[in-house]
Amino acid sequence: MVTATTPAVARPDGQQRTARRIPIFVAALLCLLAALWGGLLLLGLPLPTLASSTASDHGPLITLGFLGTVISLERAVALGRSWGFLAPAVSGAGGLALLVGQPLAGRLLLCLASVLLCVIYLVVHRIQPAFHLRVMALGALCWYVATVLWLAGWTVPRMVPWLAGFLVLTILGERLELARVGMLRRSAVRQLAAAGALFLVGLLVATVSPETSTGTRLAGAGMLALALWGAAHDVARRTVRVPGVTRFMAVCLLAGYVWLAVGGTIWLVAGDLGSSLAVYDSGLHAVFLGFVMSMIFGHAPVIVPAVLRVRLPFHPSFYAHVVLLHTALAARLVGGDALGSNLWWTGGGIATEVAVVLFLVASATAVVRARRTGRTA
């Protein structure tokens, strides 16, 4: 993500280039909203089907159409070169292609976007080599593998662990980028490398030997190790004591690591994510909602200003959607998946979506309020 420690490869864009980012961001938001609608359909709500793919492509829409586009946009901004914006533009187009009923075109575009993102990392790494860039590039490579498997006919449940790899490694790499300020010891970097390698080996084994549980267990062990590493070495451990937006970000990050550990434990213990709906639901949503969405909530005050060049001032009300997300997810996983209550499963699922919508509303409100304050100041 674009942070204060991101190396400045080029000068900031002007207002004209900023305007070009808006359609890309809008495409990402459309994919997010469509994915949320598809999630409600998967929860069994009697709602109209807005597009044929909103339910079946719920995961890819939110992971690639939304997050893949936003992450690519962040990296394009950091790169500062016009061609870099091809990655988020192609990713957003791929998500929209899925929405209009063009699955093959959508998958091809999303695959191409992953290649373009890898090129961005390669170019930046040649300018300023860094370990965190290699970690994030491995995340982009996971995105590529996922789309290749998807194009080869693999179903979403079979290739979704690679989507988890994309987001987990990208976020951990970005957190490592921040941790450089804290002068990490070489031993800590080696620990992260070992945990990441274990995670990737697990994904590979699960792909080539899907009939065994070894790969998923290895990936789960690696994920658990990554969560423990993040909780131990992230600067959030110290910044949580600082009031205001700094504490808010730290709370979101630390809560995210807890959910990543939960997800890794489920993968490690279950072995086969497809063994039951409860295992699949809990094993994936602990990662994609608990870890990833919490990280998004926490980084929004940094991401939005850097990408869209608008102010997003922190407000204490932001804690509302954070608390709702984690409470609802716990209700879904414990009451629904573990105890078998359909009421808790459905209610928790709906509440997590409400939390995401509240996040969007709160962020938009803060931006509008800041613009009005700026005009009257």
Image (cartoon, grey):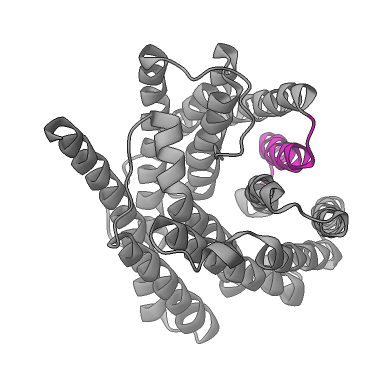
Magenta stretch: includes residue 13: no
Find residue 127 and report its horizontal and vertical position in percent: 75, 22
Residue 107 as seen in the image, left or right of residue 372 = right
Find residue 375 and report its horizontal and vertical position in percent: 15, 31
Seen from the viewer's position, the closer of residues 302 and 21 is 302
Q: Is residue 78 above or below residue 80?
A: below
Find residue 197 and report its horizontal and vertical position in percent: 85, 53
Q: Residue at x 44, y 70 (%)?
A: 326
Q: Quadrant of the C terminus?
A: top left
Q: Is residue 17 above or below residue 283?
A: above
The answer to which image quadrant residue 24 occupies is top left
Task: Provide the residue span drawn in magenta.
Answer: 129-155
Main SS class of the magenta portion in the image: helix
Residue 248 as seen in the image, left or right of residue 160 = left
Q: Residue at x 43, y 61 (%)?
A: 248
Q: Residue at x 74, y 42 (%)?
A: 132
The reply to whether residue 286 is in sight is: no
Seen from the viewer's position, the closer of residues 146 and 370 is 370
Q: Is residue 63 above or below residue 90?
A: below
Seen from the viewer's position, the closer of residues 31 and 231 is 231
Q: Quadrant of the N terminus?
A: top right
The answer to which image quadrant residue 124 occupies is top right
Seen from the viewer's position, the closer of residues 219 and 371 is 371
Find residue 16 and report its horizontal and vertical position in percent: 37, 12
Magenta stretch: includes residue 143: yes
Count of labels shown? 0
Q: Is residue 261 above or below residue 20?
A: below
The reply to whether residue 187 is in sight is: yes
List the single residue furthest toward the left: 376
Q: Residue at x 79, y 63 (%)?
A: 222
